[in-house]
Image (cartoon, rainbow, N blue to C red):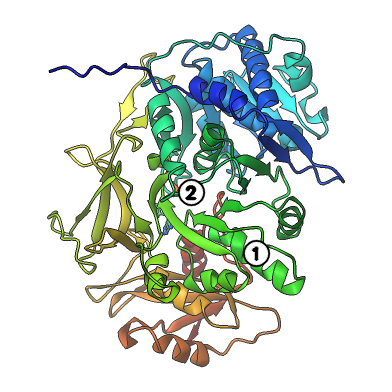
């Protein structure tokens, strides 16, 4: 028997058309740092996306062309998110915090011909242009001196001049739902960055998942503060998901410091927000020093790195509920979300909230032990997590320029023979399907044949009242192979008493896991997307730059 159902492709142009009509009154509000933010309705965004598509077509952008954005979170970036894939081109978000060498590599690898950039990032982009031979046009938007582009061997356009006066509708093509829609390179701590190419279908299905109550579950009554950058895995899918259900967006633009974030929460009263733990740590310090009203925030999606339970508790006290999510660039990014099962009291739900969470139906998971066997979901057996699903990568982008023909790359360490994605994350899964990650495979501390979780030690340390942040890394040890080194950032006015910190840890951590090497640092080094950058700490230790005390 054949199905009798229609086979309509799942396209981003559908999300755009739906959002800008049915939810035409919803708004994207962009923080300007001035008395009034910029407000734009979804209907306006839809019209302007059509105008942008006309403009890009006139610049020669066609189906399959990777088109770069070097932008903060703002309304124009949302327009690019909708216009570029809908016209059949590929939205390529460029991470403006990457080292220049990596940016050059990525733009060349993707062969971008057009880059849309915010005026404020031109001092970063302009010096790189002589090394970006494929870039023909730079389209500039928002405040910032244009002078850095003077004399550049590219055509420079003002976004508003280029787009205004053009038709406000576009005959969006009927694409194959499996066609490329967006491209994002992993922040890659080792080797060259790797490009993940999302399809219309994967973005569409992922957006529906983001909108499910078990994930972010937002509606047009909500406003979400999208702190997670649009260059970090498509801002966790929010710009597309919000257009599906009319969720208002509050965009911080370049104002990502704790002070302005607190101010925009207080004045715009978003009901939801999404950001990595370091942002919430910074905001907590800010509101502890200068109390602000954060009570509009009913729920917060926190992910990208493990959320310290102490942080969750601190926000619970402020009436803000942090909900942990786990995912990765290769997963669009949504994997698990940590909502407790139904019917539990707050107290009973707590142990579930501090885990990484449950898998949605579309994401299958398995744990692989050190000997390659599939491990049981018993909440104890620890192995490497592998996943598969319709928004999970099956390969990396091989580059436009390699041989004329595009190639896909499937490194063995990233993909199993039978097609599952190897996440590089280590942990266990309970019989109820809750994932607990204990570490990245490369961060776990292998001491005398046993594994010590650096994340467990960090979480325990960050629960100490005098510790602002803590990062634990493996360092070589003659006797045990590796041992933990605890680096801590103390709160203002606190003094280092390592013996006391160690005794504090001993209350929750097995004795053989307690670090004997300690160092105070001014700040935990962070990656371009705000995660702890442990390779920098390991290098500082190896180079003898840390003042290490043995306790
Ligand atoms: P990225 O692709 O840069 O977003 O990095 C993905 C990686 O971030 C994952 O493989 C995890 O190691 C880590 N990660 C993301 N979310 C979490 C979380 N909630 N808890 C622990 N690690 C996380």
Q: Residue 462: tell me if it is visible.
A: yes
Mark sitting earlier along the chain (1/2): 2
Residue found at x 71% / y 84%: 493
Marks 1/2: CA–CA distance: 23 Å
Numbered tag placed on residue 282 in the rendering = 1
Examine the rendered structure and indicate whether residue 135 appears above or below residue 541.
above
- What residue did someone put label 2 on? 216
Tell me the quarter of the picture where residue 31 sits: top right
Examine the rendered structure and indicate whether residue 529 appears above or below residue 511.
above
Q: Quadrant of the N terminus?
A: top left
Q: Residue 129: tell me if it is visible.
A: no
* Between 330 and 194, the one nearer to me in the picture: 330
Asked whether the residues under the numbered discs 1 and 2 touch, taking CB atoms below 8 Å apart as contact, a structural biologist would say no
Residue found at x 17% / y 39%: 417
Q: For this view, does 531 lie left or right of residue 4? A: right
Numbered tag placed on residue 397 in the rendering = none
Q: Position of residue 64 (x, y in %)?
A: 46, 16
Q: Position of residue 99 (x, y in %)?
A: 59, 43
Q: Nearer the viewer, mark 1 or mark 2?
A: 2
Q: Position of residue 235 (x, y in %)?
A: 54, 42
Residue found at x 75% / y 28%: 141
């Amino acid at each position: 028997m054949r199905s009798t159902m229609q086979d309509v492709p799942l396209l981003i142009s559908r999300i755009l058309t739906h959002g800008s009509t049915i939810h035409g009154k919803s708004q994207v509000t962009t923080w300007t740092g001035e008395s009034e933010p910029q407000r734009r309705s979804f209907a306006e965004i839809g019209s302007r996306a059509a105008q942008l598509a006309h403009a890009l077509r006139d610049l020669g952008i066609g189906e399959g062309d990777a088109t770069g954005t070097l932008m903060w979170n703002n309304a124009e970036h949302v327009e690019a998110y909708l216009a570029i894939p809908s016209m059949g081109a590929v939205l390529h978000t460029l991470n403006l915090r990457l080292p220049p060498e990596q940016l050059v590599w990525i733009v060349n690898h993707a062969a971008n011909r057009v880059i849309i950039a915010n005026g404020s990032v031109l001092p970063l982009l302009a010096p790189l242009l002589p090394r970006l031979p494929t870039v023909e046009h730079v389209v500039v938007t928002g405040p910032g001196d244009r002078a850095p582009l003077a004399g550049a061997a590219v055509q420079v356009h003002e976004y508003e001049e280029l787009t205004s006066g053009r038709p406000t509708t576009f005959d969006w093509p009927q694409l194959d739902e499996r066609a490329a829609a967006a491209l994002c390179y992993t922040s890659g701590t080792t080797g060259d960055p790797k490009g993940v190419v999302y399809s219309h279908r994967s973005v569409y299905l992922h957006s529906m998942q983001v909108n499910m109550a078990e994930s972010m579950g937002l509606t047009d009554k909500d406003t979400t503060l999208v702190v997670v950058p649009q260059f970090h895995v498509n801002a966790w899918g929010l710009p597309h998901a919000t257009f599906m259900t009319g969720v208002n967006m509050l965009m911080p633009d370049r104002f990502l410091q704790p002070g302005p974030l607190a101010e925009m929460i207080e004045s715009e009263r978003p009901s939801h927000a999404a950001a990595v733990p370091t942002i919430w740590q910074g905001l907590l310090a800010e509101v502890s020093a200068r109390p602000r009203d954060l009570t509009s925030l009913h729920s917060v999606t926190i992910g990208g790195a493990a959320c310290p339970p102490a942080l969750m508790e601190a926000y619970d006290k402020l009436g803000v509920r942090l909900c942990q999510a786990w995912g990765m660039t290769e997963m669009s990014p949504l994997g698990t979300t940590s909502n407790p099962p139904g019917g539990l009291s707050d107290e009973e739900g707590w142990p579930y909230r501090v885990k990484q969470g449950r898998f949605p139906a579309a994401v299958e998971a398995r744990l692989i032990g050190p000997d390659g066997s599939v491990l049981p979901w018993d909440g104890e057996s620890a192995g490497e997590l592998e996943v598969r699903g319709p928004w999970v990568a099956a390969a990396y982008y091989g580059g436009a320029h390699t041989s004329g023909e595009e190639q896909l790359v499937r490194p063995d360490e990233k993909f199993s023979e039978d097609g599952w994605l190897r996440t590089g994350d280590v942990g266990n899964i309970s019989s109820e399907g809750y994932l607990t990650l204990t570490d990245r495979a490369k961060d776990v501390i292998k001491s005398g044949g046993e594994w010590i979780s650096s994340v467990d030690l960090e979480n325990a340390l960050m629960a100490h009242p005098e510790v602002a942040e803590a990062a634990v890394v493996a360092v070589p040890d003659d006797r045990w192979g590796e041992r933990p080194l605890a680096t801590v950032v103390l709160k203002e006015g606190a003094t280092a008493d390592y013996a006391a910190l160690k005794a504090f840890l001993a209350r929750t951590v097995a004795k053989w896991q307690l670090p004997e090497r300690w160092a105070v640092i001014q700040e935990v080094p962070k990656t371009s997307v705000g995660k702890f950058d442990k390779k920098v700490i390991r290098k500082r230790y190896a180079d003898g730059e840390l003042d290490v005390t043995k306790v």
